[in-house]
Image (spheres, grey):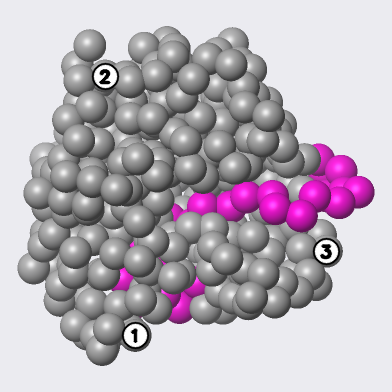
Amino acid sequence: MAGGRCHGVPERFVATVGDAAHAGETTLTLGPDDLVLCSGTLPRDVSFRERLEAARAGGFAGVSLWGRDYWNARDEGWTDTDIRSMLADSDLEVAEIDPAWWWLPGASDVHIPDDVDTQRVFRYGQDELFRIAEVVGARSLNAVDVFGGTWSVEDAAAAFATLCDRAAEHDLLVHLEFLPWSRIPDVATAWEIVRIADRRNGGIAVDAWHYERSGADEGTLRTVPGDKVLGIQLDDGVAQPEDDLVEATLHDRRLPGEGDFALAGLVSALRAIGAVAPIGVEVFSDDLHALGPVEAARRAAAATRTVLDG
C-alpha cells in the first residue's frame, strides 16, 4: 500500500525527517508497506521462539501478540529481558497487543472462570496487558466489545476516550475493532465512537472478515481519515455467511485471495484514504494451523503480497 504521513500519534512510534523543509514531520516505524503476522494465524500453542522464527521465514516486519503468547514465553522459561532480546535479534516489532476487552461500561465486572476461558483472553486484564505492552515495546492495543450491554454510542465514546488516555501513559495507540455480532457491529459505529472520543492516539481497526460479514460498507470506510485507520487485518472467507459467525471466524477463515471476499475493493479503499497502518494477516484456520508455523507463515505472507500487488 502507498506510504503516507501519520499525524497525531505517540512520539515513540515516529521518526523525525531530518531536512529543514520537513522539520517536525513524522512517520510510523511500522507502516502500510509492512506485513504483520497476527497471533491467530498460528496455533495458539506454538512456542514464542517458533512464532518469531515463522514470522522471519515469511518475511514479516512485525507480529501481534495476545497475553497468552507472552505467558507462553514466560512458562517456557524466558525472562522479560530474554523476550526483548529475541524480538530484537529477530528484527521484529510487536505491532499490537490483543484484545482489550474490559473497557466498555460493565465489562470489567464480568468474571469468566479459567476453565470457561478456552481462548485464554479474560485472565489478562487492563494492568497486565499494559505491562506486557511495555515489556515487548508494542505499538498499539486492539479494543473490542465482547459482552455488549445497554450503553449508548456516547457512553462507548467516553469509555474509549478513557482507554486511550490510559494507553497514552504507556505510549500506545488504540484501535477499535468492530465485530458483526457485537454492539459495535460495523465500520460506521466504530468510527462514530472514535470520532466522538476525539483522542489523538485513537482510531479504528479494519479486519476484512468482520468488514465483509458486516456488509462491506465501502462508502463509510472512505469517509474515515486514513490516519485514523490504525489497524488492518487481511483474511478471506466464503461468500455465504456462516450460521455461527463466532465459530467460523475462529476456525474457518481463508488466506487472502483464496476465498470470495472483495479484497481488491477493500485494499483500494484503504489506499484511497491513505491508511497508515501496517498490514496484519489474521487467518484463524484449522487447516492452515495443521501445516505447521513456518509453512503457515510463508503461505500467509505470499497470499497477502499477491493480493496487495494485484
Give the magenta range. 129-155
Name the one closer to the observer, 290 or 52: 290
Q: How many marks?
A: 3
Identify the image quadrant of residue 275: top left
- Residue that label 1 marks: 75
Q: How far, Cα to Cα, is label 3 from label 2?
A: 40 Å
User: Which amino acid type corresponds to the residue marked 3 in the rendered image?
Assistant: Gly
Residue 122 position (above or below residue 231): below
- The residue pinned by badge 2 equals 307
User: Is disc 2 placed on a helix, strand or loop?
Assistant: helix
Separation of marks 1 and 3 at Cα, in angstroms: 31 Å
Mark 3 residue element: loop
Mark 2: amino acid = Val
User: Closer to us: mark 3 or mark 2?
Assistant: 2
Tell me the mark number nearer the camera, choosing from 1 and 3: 1
Q: Which residue is mark 3?
A: 106
Looking at the image, residue 84 sits to the left or right of residue 103; the answer is: left
